[in-house]
């Protein structure tokens, strides 16, 4: 399934075709057609996805791929795309290459760097937190933000502990940075478009502050084990999501440590 994104008649959202427990309806990838055809996020290399990109380009080559971060659902499709377009250049943030990513197969992105996508320019914004190598892409003229896994319209974002590349402190700082841009629209890596991203960011900040208060209340009551805290704070969350909640509480502990509050 493909649909045009609102402001740019030659940009399209193409589904990567990988629905699942962690990816929801599957990943969104964004194709910018024009002078330098560019794909934003790679998907996982499903043939139907590669074919959909090719059908839109109608014989012309994909020249560039930008990935928001190295998680496999966003980056692992690069080899399949390269198999189709051998001269394709792939770009990502390179401080911490993700699993299965070798640095020599990527070109680096820098914070504030402008990159060509179709006929427009996108600005790279380093937004660590969900992953250390996470970036968003910002289009100043249309005030559109391509936000990867920074937010979705319908769910919260998993922030893993440092051992898995996450940082809650960095994530909150990244959310503040994105809010300061005052985006009008945000296109996420998963799920539908976010029509009021600044309000969405505020909801996320409020939610995280509430969770922090709840976890601190547990500690005050002498409940200190991770599993005990999860079963108390996430009592309304389905139990199959508790392992993810456990990682989130771990990341919160790390934030409280960093702030000298534990
Ligand atoms: Zn991710």
Image: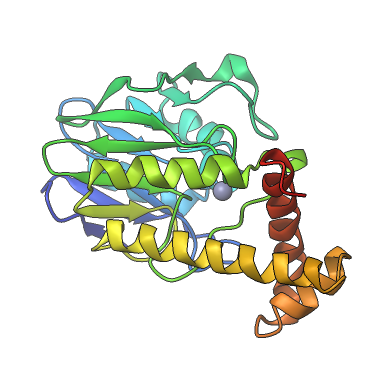
Res 64 → quadrant: top left
Left or right of residue 14: residue 33: left
Q: Vertically, is 66 above or below 24?
A: above
Q: Position of residue 153 (x, y in %)?
A: 38, 66
Q: Vertically, is 231 above or below 255?
A: below
Image point 59% across, 21% down: which residue? 95
Q: Quadrant of the N terminus?
A: bottom left
Image point 60% across, 47% down: which residue? 168
Q: Nearer the viewer, residue 100 or 134?
A: 134
Q: Position of residue 56 (x, y in %)?
A: 24, 46
Q: Position of residue 247 (x, y in %)?
A: 74, 57
Image point 72% across, 41% down: which residue? 260
Q: Residue pushed farthest bottom?
A: 236
Q: Vertically, is 43 above or below 157?
A: above
Q: Residue pushed farthest top?
A: 104
Res 58 → quadrant: top left
Image point 16% across, 26% down: which residue? 35
Q: Nearer the viewer, residue 211 or 139?
A: 211
Q: Position of residue 12 (x, y in %)?
A: 24, 51
Number of marks in picture: 0
């Amino acid at each position: 399934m493909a649909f045009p994104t609102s402001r740019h008649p030659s940009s399209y959202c193409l589904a990567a075709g990988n629905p699942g427990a962690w990816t929801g309806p599957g990943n969104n990838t964004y194709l910018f057609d024009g002078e330098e055809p560019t794909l934003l996020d790679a998907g996982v290399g499903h043939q139907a996805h590669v074919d959909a990109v090719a059908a839109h380009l109608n014989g012309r080559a994909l020249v560039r791929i930008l990935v928001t971060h190295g998680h496999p659902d966003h980056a692992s499709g690069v080899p399949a795309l390269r198999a189709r377009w051998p001269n394709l250049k792939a770009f990502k943030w390179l401080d911490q290459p993700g699993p299965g990513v070798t640095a020599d197969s990527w070109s680096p992105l820098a914070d504030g760097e402008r990159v060509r996508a179709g006929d427009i320019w996108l600005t790279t914004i380093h937004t660590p937190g969900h992953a250390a190598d996470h970036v968003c892409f910002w289009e100043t003229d249309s005030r559109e933000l391509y936000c990867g896994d920074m937010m979705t319209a319908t769910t919260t974002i998993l922030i893993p502990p440092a051992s898995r590349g996450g940082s809650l402190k960095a994530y909150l700082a990244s959310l503040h940075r994105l809010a300061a841009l005052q985006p009008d629209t945000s296109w996420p890596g998963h799920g539908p478009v976010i029509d009021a991203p600044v309000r969405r960011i505020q909801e996320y900040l409020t939610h995280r502050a509430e969770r922090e208060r709840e976890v601190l209340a547990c500690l005050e009551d002498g409940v200190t084990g991770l599993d005990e805290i999860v079963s108390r704070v996430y009592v309304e969350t389905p139990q199959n999501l508790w392992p993810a909640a456990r990682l989130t509480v771990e990341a919160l502990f790390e934030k409280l440590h960093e702030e000298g509050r534990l």
